[in-house]
Image: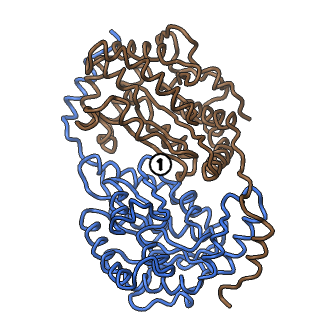
Chain colours: A brown, B blue
Amino acid sequence: MTDVRILDATRVPHGPVDLGAIATDTTPGFDGDKDEGKAALAELGEELSELQERLWAEGTAGSDRRVLLVLQGMDTSGKGGVLRHTVGLIDPQGVRIKAFKAPTDEELEHDFLWRIRRELPPPGYVGVFDRSHYEDVLIGRVRELASPEEIERRYDAINDFEQEVTAAGTTILKCMLHVSPEEQKSRLLRRLERPDKHWKYNPGDIDERGRWSAYREAYEIALERTNTAVAPWHVIPADRKWYRNLAVGHLLLDTLRLLAPQWPTADFDVAEEHRRLAEEDPVA
Amino acid sequence: MTDVRILDATRVPHGPVDLGAIATDTTPGFDGDKDEGKAALAELGEELSELQERLWAEGTAGSDRRVLLVLQGMDTSGKGGVLRHTVGLIDPQGVRIKAFKAPTDEELEHDFLWRIRRELPPPGYVGVFDRSHYEDVLIGRVRELASPEEIERRYDAINDFEQEVTAAGTTILKCMLHVSPEEQKSRLLRRLERPDKHWKYNPGDIDERGRWSAYREAYEIALERTNTAVAPWHVIPADRKWYRNLAVGHLLLDTLRLLAPQWPTADFDVAEEHRRLAEEDPVA
């Protein structure tokens, strides 16, 4: 059913990035409508689960392989929705989610990658970063939380870091959830209109929204500078929630298919264990 | 649809516990068959998810409340199955799973509760312990990993600890997955017969199986000694996987219903935020 069309169609080409030229309400690599998209996501759950279990099984047998899904996007772009609807398809035992907030005082005393390293997924896991080290070149740049020289240094530091992490067995999948300012407005309005959504609303989101074009520029620079062969970027049109969830699901599935994890072979004598199991009777 | 019948029917009465007198293949509190049980589990997912989201929302607004599900049981009793099929119904963002293995050298240098405290769920979370501090009075007792005096001390230490954790806002739900030695044997056999299950098989499981009655006695003592009003035990017949998954789902649901978490009220001026959102236009 699935092929790598979404993987290819959302990959950011090398070179300068113009987010204004990438539509937020299209469904690249998928021809179906909303109902078909939801059905397609539900359908891929089974294969996604089995591949994740194989990855996990490999991890118990000494493999270093693991996956790290990095989710970035403006407020309301749907990082939480992807976690609930897409990552939620996988056995939670094999998932490690980390939501990065504003750094603590302790974290600020270290290099920006210090807190990131501590949250990398162990072998066998699918790790998910809800925001990430990219905040340090996004809000870090827009709000001038570091000097221009330090921001500049960080792009290369990120590439070196991701190269190192990849070499240690982690496949990195980077997704920017691309939402339009109009769609963000309607989502923020919905949060204001529904008392059961008030808790999700943060007046500070309006301040960040006022810096929309500065964020777009910061994203464009980050996407260009860190779009490496080992850890390429995908821009996921995110105005349609169902496509956003499906696209990330496909990306995870295709990533795991390419890894093709295998069930480990027995490190014990199967016949001998059959004999032991048949012989003893604990309730005798 | 659901009521508290399973919660009541699986609760361990105070006093001495005789696990041999509790059937492993019954479905206390539920009259339906396997298909009905699976459907009932799927059905409760929606309410479970909403209650979990409310608990999470409360946590963002300063509430200390959280839930800790403790899963214990012999090998193959299905702790992993409960995680996949029942805990998997909840938004993974709000779940914190910890699987406790044999303690490390560092952990052994501390009191047995030291490593447990570090893994308690933060406010708003549903935490799940796959094995727990109870191992220190189960395998700890059976394999004589501590002196009899130390084992004896631990029951009261656990009760004090759980009292303290409860007072800090955590509702503790303790489930012993109760499987028969015959059912364990058939599950171990299945692992041996299927190459895609070999990775789950551990020859050491046969050694532990040989101590079945010692484990049963250790469970009976632990269940009796730590069956407190604030953190009572539930014994879940676990020979039928569908009932085991459904029962723990009901217990979680009923626990959250009793907590009745509420959507937090806005800590901002809703009208003012409407005005701000209408006014600005980031792409102008």
Quadrant location of the C terminus of chain A? bottom right
For the point 67% across and 64% down, the residue is: B201
Image side of residue B230 versus residue B38, left or right: left
The crowd level at tag 1 (other Cα within 10 Å; few <14, some 14-19, many 20+) is many
For the point 69% across and 36% down, the residue is: A257
Q: Is residue B270 above or below residue B61?
A: above
In-front residue for pair B40/A51: A51
**Residue A8: % across, % down:** 65, 21
Observer able to see residue A239:
no
For the point 50% across and 67% down, the residue is: B248
**Residue A249: % across, % down:** 59, 36
In-front residue for pair A219/A153: A153
Q: How many marks?
A: 1
Q: Is residue A90 above or below residue B43?
A: above
**Residue B3: % across, % down:** 46, 71
**Residue A92: % across, % down:** 52, 51
Image side of residue B135 versus residue A145, left or right: right
Location of residue A10 (image quadrant):
top right
Quadrant location of the N terminus of chain A? top right
Report the chain holding disc 1.
B
Judging by the rendered image, the residue that carries numbered circle 1 is B92
Residue type at numbered disc 1: Pro
Observer able to see residue A159:
yes
